[in-house]
Image (cartoon, grey):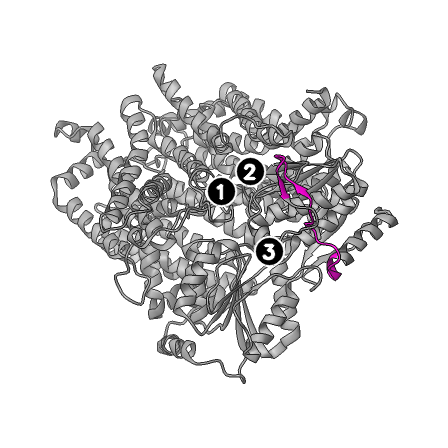
Amino acid sequence: MSTDLLISIIITVVGASTPILIAALGELVAEKSGVLNLGVEGMMLTGAVIGFAVAFVTGNAWLAIAAAALAGVLVSMIFAFLTLSLSANQVATGLALTIFGTGFSALFGQGYTGRPIALFGPLFPAELATHPTWRVIFGYSALVYFSLVMVVAVWWFLKKTRAGLILRAVGENDVSAHSIGYSVIGVRYAAVAFGGAMAGIAGACFPLLLTPQWAERLTAGRGWIALALVVFAAWRPFRLLAGAYLFGLVMTLELYAKAAGGRFSILPSEFWAALPYLATILVLVLISLRGRQSNAPACLGKPFLPSN
Amino acid sequence: MQYRLEKRPEPSRLMLYLSPVAAVVLTAVVGAVIFSLIGYDGVGAVREIFLTPILNPLKWQDLGVKAAPLILIGVGLAIGYKANVWNIGAEGQYVIGGLAGTGVALATRDFSGPWILPLMVLAGILGGMAWASIPALLKTRLRVSEILTSLMLTYVAIQVLNYLVLGPWKDPMGFGFPQTVMFTSSQSLPRVIPGTIVHLGVPLAFLIALIAWLVMSRSLFGFQIRVVGAAPQAARYGGFSANRTIWLALLVSGGLAGLAGIFEAAGPFGRMVPQFPTNYGFTAIIVAFLGRLNPLGVIFAGLAMAVAVVGGDVAQTTIRLPNAAVGIFQAMMLFFLLASDILVRYRLRRVVPQTAGSAA
Amino acid sequence: MTKLNRRTLMKIGGAGLVLPVLAGRAFAQSEPLKIGFMNVGPKDDNGWTFGHYTGMLALEEHFGDQIETTFVESVPEGPDSERVLRELAQQGNKLIFATSFGFGDYVLKVAQEYPDVIFEHATGYQRADNVGTYNARFHEGRAVLGTIAGHMSQTGKIGYIGSFPIPEVNMGINAFTLAAQKINPDIQVQVVWLSTWNDPAKEADAARALIDQGCDILVQHTDGPAALQVAEERGIIGGFGQGADMSAFAPNTHLTAIIDVWGPHYIETVQEVMDGTWVAEDSWPGLAEGEVVIGPYNEKVPEDVVAAAEAVENGIIDGSIHPFTGPIVDNMGTERVAAGETVDDAGLWAMDWYVQGVTA
């Protein structure tokens, strides 16, 4: 395989992995605080349509990303209010959020199909970004570097800051955290908002990074892969990074193999499509076999009901 | 002025029945206003989505056919959720059930007789159970969360479907289109009301829901489930094995989902196609909650969802409401219904700010 | 605010009662002919459904007050489509177009129940007394595209993004390749199957993969311009619009497009229904009837290439050129069409092979 081809593959893989990584990072923080938000796909679609619309109207990609993040936060607040303040079931509410996001994005996007926008260009200057070799490192748009920075930021936040410790405590033992005096609901609201913002940005990656257009269901189920990814990574940010690129690699390599005229393997393409999900189950089993707890936040999915 | 949610001494029966109604009315009002503001016929939308399906007798058969799988799956899930077993993978079990039944149909293509259909149905139930037994095994043996495993398995099931329908099970006479051959008449669910599309699965769904309600409210099994869900420690003292409950809950919900799958395949679909997963498994989760995890409630909730779906089609064909708007109406209804649930268990109390130092 | 008073209830009830009466009445010339369209996607999908929507607009412009149209979008291919068809029939639509292959089974079912309603199924093959099928000879357009590609490709490698290996797609691939090879016998066509009609991100990645393999012209048979956008981004020689003119998405790379123009067929069909001369048949027009139109050529296409393309186009129109003229050998070495012979319609439907030079 020539270097050029290898570099091209790497660049494509990075493109495919980045939105999943960003969405998964957001969901990781939410889940670490004890909230299971199954509405990721809906939030991503909302971010995608708003990001596209703002990019189309203003021509400014940064504004578009900011708007997408804001849209994600707003939509996630519906979920937060229902599940945190009204103690509604998180699974049902998350699914309802996905339905809402799908419908809202389709309705909002009706005037925007058939319109192209400009791709969000590379962050670094052209000499580095288009250099045959160095573009592997410097050729990406700001969203990619953002995702990498956020991996470190989330890790550092959870591991090294007091706020992160509180968040983890809320996720592991909400009653104790509450009795110490921390606002469980408040922390979770913030975590869900962060998840919403990241999901919105991840959605915006599609029109800004991958396919500069709007079409219904543009994200085509990537939100569910992001959910799987969080579990696959055992709620650890660096494993999330590795997992995202692994998933992206599998998704991309198959296409490249087909394009090269060969078969990726004897196994049918459906097997490779199912692989991220099978791998996630396998990881869960392995962690359990090693005798450790699954690392899932103990309060994941359970509403906080102080006993007063 | 602060408000606080205060737990009621016991769930309010009034709110139990009033809150869903209030939620639907609120959806209608808010929806009509919002859609009128953005330029659609808001009142017309509400009328076509919510009222016409109920009032137009021609639509009742559609309601029945659409509600049946939701009720079947919803009942199974409700039983499981009552026991604190969170099966999120009903969609996958539904698909595998449909596939299992299809497999039997393809194998018995050249035969005919009244034994074929029951065999297919049995295969469907067993298929759904088998798929649900994976999360059951992982949960009881390795304490792996059934939420995650059952959800992941759903997407695996969809890929299995794609593989079979695009590959070995593809109809050789179908011009290469991804679909199996059509089921023969021995392999199709009979219509129970002539002149309508109401197939056998519809009354059976209602019947099974009623039986489930009887079992859950009158039998030891039902009692066991409820105790295990409400007070696991007490259940252990009572001799109810947690593992057995997990297995039972997953097998029952998996089996019912698989049953719904084969009913849909042998009934409305008539063959297996890649479009088979229609999200019934996920919608049924919502139906289970809307029905307050009670099989009778699930019947009503299933019908309510069916109204929203069927009404959506009516609105599209009569007042040209765009398809996307229908999804928003449905989501709004769900949000309001989920939100109204709180009023059953809690009530709103005005709080006078307390001085520092008083007991929490 | 929805006022649920006696008056609205009477209105709704009354409407419900009138519906069956309307459906039963024979079509009277004085009132507008109600026409329904059932589609698998949204009208702004940049491609397939958009083409039918444009066709409907042409109908409205031509017939004005004489017709009343309903356009239902995003109907899944499954039992839901059966319900929508029935709904359309119940609403008094006398002519219904179902614009996707997967609707076929359900069109036949509903057609049986409404013998006085005329149904037309796009890209289907099953007919009945009141069910006709219609299609467009897109492969004729592909032959024109192939001519252009044959002239303009420098690497001799063409990337072809396909959805499913169904006859319609296979015809397109083969017609394209044969035409290109007439210009440059060494043309190689590499096909990548997406197993979906609509996933822009996957389409874009497939385009990138093909370009990385050295393809300098891209063709796609999916709904949407994602591949074209990648072509533009990478600056390869060219790509083509599918179903509609997509030059807005790729001003430098968009060489031309195959445009679906359903207007003429729709106008002809409606006129036949109005005159009472409609018969159930398979309608398969192409370039000659103006149902397949080649879009405007990009400035960068050299004049002699434009001339060659137009020559092929005119040749097909006047019958002197047939896209599938023998000798044709498939990519396994078997001769499929003898010298001097052409492939007839039945042979086109049976096309599950690929010509030499195609890797699929």
Residue C140 is marked as: none
Which secondary structure, mark 2? helix
For residue A180, which quarter of the picture? Answer: top left
In the picture, measured across the screen, residue B50 lies left or right of residue A3, that is: left
In the picture, measured across the screen, residue C222 lies left or right of residue B156, that is: right
Residue A76 is marked as: 1
Q: Nearer the viewer, mark 3 or mark 1?
A: 3
Q: Residues within 10 Å of mark 1 (few under 14, many from 20)?
A: many
Residue A284 pos. (x, y %): 39, 23
Disc 2 residue type (three-letter): Ala
Pointer 3 residue = C345
Pointer 2 residue = A197
Circles 3 and 1 on the same subunit: no
In the picture, measured across the screen, residue A282 lies left or right of residue B236, that is: right
Does residue A253 lie above or below C190 as drawn? above
Does residue C342 lie above or below C332 as drawn? below
